[in-house]
Image (tube, grey):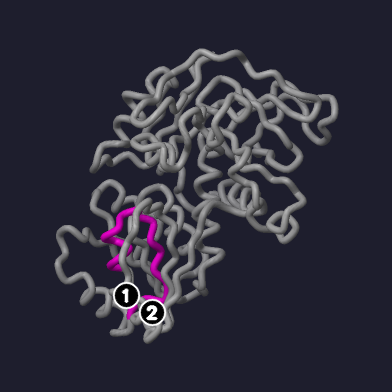
Amino acid sequence: MKTALLKGPREVVLEEVPVPEISADEVLVEVKYCGICGSDIHSIPECNLYQAGAYLGHEFSGVITKVGMNVKGWKMGDRVVANPMYICGECYGCQHGRWCDYGADAAIGVTPGLEYAGAFAKYVRVPLPERRLYRLPDEVSFEEGALVEALACSLHAVRISAFRPREQTMVLGAGMIGLGVIAHLKNAGAGLIIVTETIEKRAEMARRLGADHVFNPQKVTNLKEKVLELTGGKGVDVVFDCSGVPEAFRSATDFLRKGGQILLKGIIPKEVPIFPMDFTFNEWQIQGSLCYYADEFPMIIEFLKRRVSPVREMITSKIKLSDIIKKGFDILGKPGSSEIKILVEPDE
C-alpha cells in the first residue's frame, strides 16, 4: 500500500510499504478518511515539528478489519476514530486525566518509523486500542469522524482557558482550530466573540459558527479601538491566539482587559519578544494549549452526533491519496489558501 512519508525538509513522497502486521494487543483499521493537519504542513519546510522519517496522518476515521487475540471490547466492522497520541496509563499526566507525559513519543502519524506509521494510507495499525479507540456512531459520518481529533484540540483550548460563560472573547485566526474554538465558545455561552481573519472564505465560516464580529487585520487599521468600543472600553476577557503568526501574538495584549488571559494555541516556532512589565502591571496571563485530554474525544463525538454546529462545512475538499502532494500539501502550504480542512481518501 502507499503511504505519505516526510522524507526530509521540503520533501514528502508517497512510498510503497507492506500492510501492517498487528500483535495480539493491537487492531488494524481500514482508513476511510484522514484530515491534513496544520502541523503536517508546518513540519514539511524544516521538519521542526515532526522529524524526517515520520509517516504522516493522524486525524482519521475508519473500520476495524483485524483484532488481536488479547484485545477486549472491539470487533471487526466497528466504526472508529482514534487518539493518535500514546497513552501509557501510568505517568503523572495519565493518572491525573491529563496529557500523557510520553504522548508524542509513540504517536501515530507523528513519531518517525513504520512502527508508528500514520493514516495517509489504506490501513493503519493502532496499539493500545482500549485506550486510544472511540466508537463512531452511525449518526456520524466517516467524514465528520475525521474532524474529531482537530475539534478535540479546539475544545481543549476552551476547557483549559480562563473563559467563563457570558464573557467577552477574541479569536485570532480562523483556520480549522480557530473555527473549532469559535464553535465551542458559542456553544458554551460566550457573551461576545470577535475574530480576526484575512481570508474571506474562512471569515464567512467564522460568522456561520457564531462569531459576532469578524475583522481583516490587514484592512482595519484601528482594530484596537474597535475592540475597545465593542467591549465598553475594557478589552476582552480571553484572547485565543490560533494564528501561528508572530505579529498576531504580539498584538494580543492590545485587546485584553486587565487581569485577562492569552490562550496560545497556534504554533509559533520562533522567538517573539514581549515586555514582561506589562504583564506584571496588568496581571495578564499566558496559557499554552497543545492537544487534548482523552475524555475530549467522546465529548466531540457527542457534539457531532447532536448536530450542535455546522462544523461539517469546514470540510472544503476531499481528495485521493495519490493526489495528496499536489492537491493537498502544496495547496495548503501556499500563503492565502482558502482551504479549511482537506480530507484524504485512500486509493482503491
> Which of the labelled discs sits on residue 310, or is there none?
none
Tell me the quarter of the picture where residue 73 sits.
Answer: top right
Q: Residue at x 73, y 37 (%)?
A: 128
In the image, residue 148 lies at what x, y percent?
55, 44
Which numbered disc, 1 or 2, marks the residue closer to the eye?
1
Q: Is residue 64 left or right of residue 61?
A: right
The numbered mark at residue 275 is: 1
Q: Position of residue 30 (x, y in %)?
A: 62, 23
Is 245 a magenta residue?
A: yes
Provide the secondary structure element on which disc 2 rests: helix
Amino acid type of the residue that numbered disc 1 sits on in the rendered structure: Phe
145 w.r.t. 262: above or below? above
Question: Could one spot residue 207 in this view of the protein?
Answer: no
Please report the residue visible at 45 percent of the width from the left and 53 percent of the height from the top: 180
**Residue 162 belongs to the span the image colors magenta:** no
Q: Secondary structure at mark 1?
A: loop
- 323 or 259, nearer to the observer: 259
Above or below: residue 173 compared with residue 191? above
In this view of the protein, which residue sits in the foreground, 76 or 17? 17
User: In the rendering, at what x and y percent does residue 116 appear?
Assistant: 60, 30
| Crowding at mark 1 (Cα within 10 Å: few <14, some 14-19, many 20+) | few
- The answer to whether residue 199 shows anywhere in this view is yes
Quadrant housing the N terminus = top right
Q: Which residues are magenta?
A: 235-251
Question: For mark 2, what is the residue?
Answer: 279
